[in-house]
Amino acid sequence: VNVTVNCDEKKAEISDHLYGIFFEDINFAADGGLYAELVQNRSFEYHTVPGRNPLREKYHALYAWQKVERNGGECTLTAEREIPLNRNNHNYLTVHIDKAGEAGVMNTGYDGIPLDRGAKYDFSVYARREGGISKLSITLETQDSKVCGKASVKGIDANWKKFETTIQSRITTDNARLVVTSENTGKLHLDMISLFPQDTFKGRKNGLRKDLAQALADLEPEFLRFPGGCISHGHSLENAYRWPDTVGDVAQRRGNWNLWGYHQTYGLGFFEYFQFCEDIGAEPLPVVPVGVSCGFRPPYECAPMDELDEWIDEAVNLIEFANGDTDTEWGSVRAEMGHPEPFDMEYICLGNEEHDRPELHERFPHFVKAIREKYPDIKIIGTSGLGTGIPLYPLMDKLNVYSSDEHYYMSPEWYFNNDTRFDDFDRSKPLIFVGEYASQGNTHYNALAEAAFLTGVERNADIVDMTCYAPLFAHKNHTQWRAADLIWFDKRQVVKTPNYYVQQLFSKNAGDYYLGNDVEVVREGKPQTISGSVGLGSWNTQIEAAEARLNGRKLDLSEFEQSSGDFDFSGGSLSQKDGGARPAISFSPKEFSGEKITYSVRARKTAGDEGFLIVFGA
Ligand code: AHR
């Protein structure tokens, strides 16, 4: 293959944010994944989850907790709501300790708590008491009760108070548990029982698991789309992702059930997403719901028009939260969280693959109008919908949004064949954001298909502005999306797929321009037996010479019958007629079969066209 690149011919400018990542809390990507919290169900808010996931019924307020009774201590556990920690954090644990000794509760985290020898862990808890309890013992221990590390907190009284301590582990283990006990009798009320490794990504408090966050950073993404996906618009409006619930003190955040069948603490919330973007140099691309729930899952719900302002205000306020001065309502929340400087958010994504229904058409324009009125510089990314048919693109075009987000999960063959997808897109319409795509597998073949597709994206970089693969993460023991995920992990390991390396290759080597080029292929065929026709498939290609020999005798191409009208044989060589284009041609030998043939083909990609494929065989 000879490739000639014409450095003076800038065919398309490649956007400086063509390659990014899309994070959604699916496959336990957030709690139990990227979010470094080691305690599961820390605020006792788990409950049976609506929807279709068969696992949903296993959840309850004391999920992942067990009572501990040692040295004569006896207790029972209940989940209570009478005097909650605050109005967003309804449930708490009550340990009724009837007999003195050692009594309390343990948590096994997400499939056991991994600890490293010498590493430090930050423990915190909210506690109050009825009776004589004033001190708590905090132990990290192995499954066979070997103590890895120990600490205590004192001064518990009748009011909710936060207690914090640090524990250093003496042991490396994959399967520890956190044990919280008291030696006295009485009622002990506990909430927000939390354990974090100190060694988080960039050492952030309430931070991210270092290895997983580093795997994302190593992709060098130009943007981060978050938090979904379907979890943005929700299974029903009840669990749409409402960003104000996810900021402020973690103890004040109102968790929610997850459309994928489990729970979200929102400990990883919008502040943490923005901060992570800053930490890895990625543009934040937050997705906000537009008051219409997921069309795939009943109930399909839409916010009544007279209540739509609440949803619109929330979208507009997000811009104030990210960029507003510290004396604004939402800018001050950001500042209190430790980030007085603006996050310099430039884009907002409205909706996620909503269905092409009248309710959406009625609601969507109100969001666009309100954002443009208050923040004319913010770039609005609309949604084209799920599938290659991009049903909502006409609406996005009418609203003249900055770009429109299209999603498709297709076979590898589709990606190979659709490197030409954008060639005919109308350049006067909104830019394209390929916000979710994957070729339904994690084999090398899948990765190759995605790479082929991305070559077509780069050739069309004048209209394709951004791309990102989906889903990003999958916990190997807790998946809802098994077909293909970019990074697989468990509590210890991170496995990068071939698809990951394709994303990394393109992202790290994104160019400034797609340059004019000329590709010449010289292909020597091996002797083979003809049975039937000889095929020469060409895709907008100039065939410069094609030669075939039968048992050493050079064949005149007139010995073949041409089955496509797009080619000439004149002069013993084969060339494409003026204006001739795809599809492939095939030749049937006139007079022979079952004999050895050798062949060679010289071909050149025709300027301005999209590529070629040659197959010459029997
Ligand atoms: O990436 C998984 C899901 O696929 C997303 O939540 C949704 O947008 C799409 O249908």
Image (tube, helix red, strand yellow):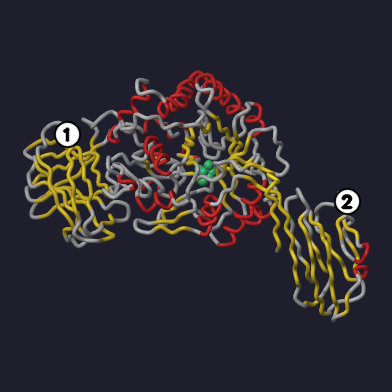
276 up-or-down from 415: above or below: above
Q: Which numbered disc flags the more N-terminal residue, 1 or 2?
A: 1
Q: Quadrant of residue 118?
A: bottom left
Q: Quadrant of residue 382?
A: top right
Q: Quadrant of the C terminus?
A: bottom right
Write the residue at 8% across / 43% down.
Answer: 185
Query: Label 1 to label 2, Cα distance in Å?
Result: 82 Å
What residue is shown with label 1?
A: 161
- In this rendering, position of residue 603 left or right of residue 201: right
Q: SS class of the residue under badge 1?
A: strand
307 up-or-down from 342: above or below: above
Q: Residue furthest bottom?
A: 551
- In this rendering, position of residue 54 left or right of residue 138: right
Three-letter residue code for mark 1? Lys
Three-letter residue code for mark 2? Asp
What residue is shown with label 2?
A: 578
Write the residue at 82% across / 75% down.
Answer: 530
Write the residue at 47% across / 48% down.
Answer: 220
**Callout 2: few (<14), some (14-19), or many (20+) C-alpha neighbours within 10 Å?**
few
Residue 601, x across and y down, in percent: 79, 67
Can residue 344 be seen? yes
